Image (cartoon, rainbow, N blue to C red):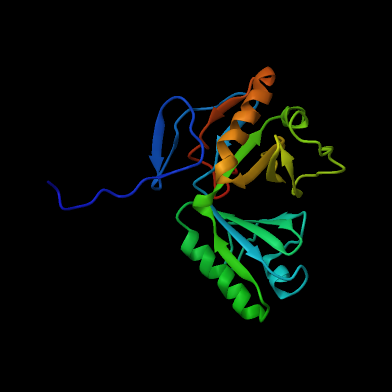
Amino acid sequence: MSDIAAAPIARTALSFPGPVRTTDGWETTARHAAGGLRLADLGPLVKLTVRGPADGSVRAALGTSFGHTVRPRGGPLAGALVVGSGPGEWLVLGAPGTGGELLAGVRSIIADSGEFASVVDVTHGRALVRLTGADTPLLLSKVCAVDLADRVVPDGAAFRSSVARVVTDVVRDDVDGTRSYLLHCERSSGQYLADSLVDAGIEYGIEVGAPTEHDDATGHPR
């Protein structure tokens, strides 16, 4: 018997029929979605929640405020997606395996600010999916009451609402000019939310699959 213990495998909140794959220590679906409407499991992405003053040094360093997003090009959060998910509340998303680096980055921002703020790594406690395709507004209109017109929710906008009766952070994050949304919720509600999206998208030909190997830290094609 080998004395070397097998590396632990983490599993996302979602499970779909078909083959699975293990990447970066995470087991996810290996299904390939190539249709015009796609749902991808981004559970392995690092997820940090930050809370602090709605206006001040922390907000300035994070680079965005409530209802907006930013991808810092430099600094301790370079390559991550920072979401203003609520007044004085942010969600930081990053590539799998970068949790320690991003956590240290946010902590340095808080320390330099002199403000009272907190950061918590919730990677394993949350579910995250990406819904992409021209028909995403039609699908989401069946499970969410928010008006998703461009004038109300443009690319880069974020809001928190009920989606299929689940409290969900919704981020519009278009991919090469195609409508795309990130949906983030508590892990315990993740499978229900994903199943509800699939059910609502059947008439539009929705397909479920893993992000492609060319995706960047936030599941966004390079």
Residue 97 locus on image (x, y percent)? 45, 55
Total count of labels: 0
Residue at the limit of the structure toward the right, as seen here:
151
Residue at the limit of the structure toward the left, as seen here:
1
Residue 25 locus on image (x, y percent)? 38, 47
The quarter of the picture where residue 33 lies is top right
Residue at the limit of the structure toward the bottom, as seen here:
114
Q: Is residue 50 visible?
A: yes
Which corner quadrant holds the C terminus?
Answer: top right
Residue nearest the observer in this picture, 132 or 18: 18
The quarter of the picture where residue 106 lies is bottom right
Relative to residue 55, is residue 176 drawn left or right? left
Residue nearest the observer in this picture, 178 or 57: 57
Q: Is residue 221 visible?
A: no
100 shown above or below 200: below
Residue at horizontal 78%, vertical 70%? 55
Residue 147 locus on image (x, y percent)? 84, 38
Residue at horizontal 49%, vertical 59%? 99
Residue 86 locus on image (x, y percent)? 74, 57
The quarter of the picture where residue 39 lies is top right
Residue at the limit of the structure toward the top, as seen here:
203
Residue nearest the observer in this picture, 197 or 67: 197
Residue at horizontal 69%, vertical 18%? 203
